[in-house]
Image (tube, helix red, strand yellow):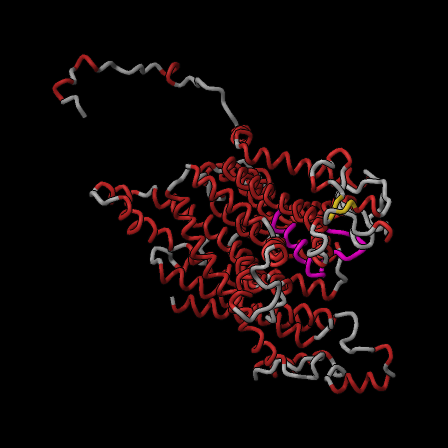
Amino acid sequence: MTTSNADVTKELFVPADLNDSVSEQISGESVSAWRDAIRRFVTNKGAMASMIIIFLIVVFAIIGPHFFGYGVDDQDVSRANLPPKIGALSWIPAFSGHEGGVDVYKEKKITKNYWFGTDQLGRDLWTRTWMGTQISLIIALIATLADVCIGVVYGGVSGYFGGMVDNVLQRILEIIAGIPSLVWIILLILILQPGLVTITIAILATSWLSMARIVRGEMLKLKNQEFVLASRTLGANDGRIIFKHLIPNSIGMIIINTMFSVPSAIFFEAFLSFIGLGIRSPQSSLGSLINDGYQMLQIHPYQTLYPGIIISLLLICFNIMGDGLRDAFDPKLRR
Amino acid sequence: MGRYILKRVGYMLVTFYVVVTLTFLAMKMLPGTPFKFANRLTPEQLNQLKHYYGLDQPIPVQYVHYIWNMLHGDLGGSFQYGMQPVTEFLAQRFPISMQLGIESMIIGTILGIVLGIISGIYRGRFLDWGTVTLTVVFISIPSFIFAAILQYCFSVQIRIFPVIGWDTPMTHVLPVISIGVGVMASIARFMRTEMVEVLGQDYIITAQAKGLSTPAVIYKHAIRNAMIPIVTVIGPMTAAVVTGSLVIENIFAIPGIGSQFIDAIITNDYPMIMGTTELYAALFIVTIFIVDILYGVIDPRIRVSGGKPA
């Protein structure tokens, strides 16, 4: 504030240009909400890196099990507990095939390389790890579907119709949410046999709750806005308003929430398999592999290491990507 | 407020009743029998056993019987341990799980709040970036993997801590860290968000404008306000920690209800499974209730009667 009032003279003021055609002109290129979000997402280095890592994991989960032609359950005790060995990378201690200073491959006269080693039944861990990753990814897909198909519809109906419908649906939801999901899942597993189907049902039953709440909140916020009224005036029915106007407007929130329910579903499957209530042998899942390896942790730590790294990477990347999407779709939340 | 609490208590009871009924029905639909060597018993012996445990009565009768006993504080006897009352087991093992949960919560919460505050104050700088990265990693890595890593490094390779057990203070360290790290990361993340939001408020500018020093502004105005919403996450997290510690109890052979629960499931010990499930559910329901009420008490700006804050 160095200039005093006396320095401001009348000559400094110039009338603004009031010409409509000039002031109304859009100088920048118009950007849709989607492109704006994508642009913000792409500049987020962490989120992009996570996306690439997830993509790589997906690719390996698909092609990985076919690398060496072993089945998930091809047992051969003569090659049991081999440490990882990759011919081209054998200068790295972790991939040299040595364990406790001994070249186990030479000792057992095995010429083939097992990239992630073998377990105590001689099953190839590379194949089993990627098969397990497939399970995790299937679970991720199921959680997404549950969120979108059940959560969005439930929350949408509840929020849009309001009144009695809302009241009843919310009370039901409150009761379902009042039961810890662990209890739900364990009850289901007790009745059905442990396995992929049971886990699927359990995730379908529990993972959509938070989505339903969020979509309901969005509906309550949006349904009284002018564009909905305009649409109704033009004769749109409820279904059209919900699916053409309200849900597309809350798509950002829906995507963000889906991204966060995916890692928790993946974690839950691994958790259940780890305590022996999920996927069971001979099928493999990352959780059950970690559990198997855990029994041998003191002698053969590599059996836990690789499934552990992959599930951790998956979860970290999904979480970072979720953060990135949240920042991209809702810059207000960016902090 | 009074009416709201009454309403919530009503929902709590309904939810709990639903849990009890569902667990009961689930038990009745279970495949397999709870009796060891069932295939070697003659039908007469099996019937006698069933009669002894009251399993030969029609299901509705069993149900009413169960609910009635439950109202009298009797959850039945364990099938595996010669009809020893389930409540006795729970009373013996629950405090251990609770202790593990509370120790982890306290350490995790304190560290999380400190980290979150630092991260929020130094927003956008290297320290903040480091904390944010660390928290994402710690939130993501499952606790059992973390426990396995800790056990391998600090019990197998460097023998500082015992591998398993729950007696001396040294045995508490690894399990508490395994659970506490996740708590710390979630709280730090939440606290950081709150700090950043509070620091952007007008009353912070006012405090600075009236000449308060930066530490005074941060301590008196920012931290105090940012702490309020932490209550909302701590409650559900406590419930999650106590139920989720199941796996950690298993890894470190801690004699809490978690390991008991897994045993009960494997041996089809119906009354034990039901008792533990109900305890978990009750714990979960009550914590969420307390948090909702506390939240309204601590922060008068939140209207409790408006329902659960989003």
Image coordinates for residue B147, horizontal then vertical, percent: 60, 56
Q: Is residue B301 left or right of residue A308?
A: left
Name which residue lies at 66% across and 75% down.
B272
> Can the viewer see residue B22?
no
Residue B181 image point, x, y percent? 52, 54
Residue A208, given in percent of the width and then of the height, sits at 61, 52
Q: Is residue A277 magenta?
A: yes
Find residue B32 and report its horizontal and vertical position in percent. Answer: 79, 72
The residue lying at 57 percent from left, 51 percent from top is A212
Q: Quadrant of the N terminus of chain A?
A: top left
Placement of the C terminus of chain A among the 4 image quadrants = top left
Q: From this viewpoint, which residue is outermost toward the left?
A: A6
| Left-right relation of B302 to A1 | right
Q: Is residue A277 left or right of residue B17?
A: right
| Residue B69 sits in quarter | bottom right
Front residue of this view, candidates A262 and B297: A262
Is residue A5 something that shows in the picture?
yes
Which residue range is magenta in the image?
A262-285
**Is B101 displayed left or right of B40 in the figure?**
left
Residue in view at x 55 percent, y 58 percent: B179
The answer to if B300 sits in the magenta stretch is no
Observer-nearest residue: B185 or A85? A85
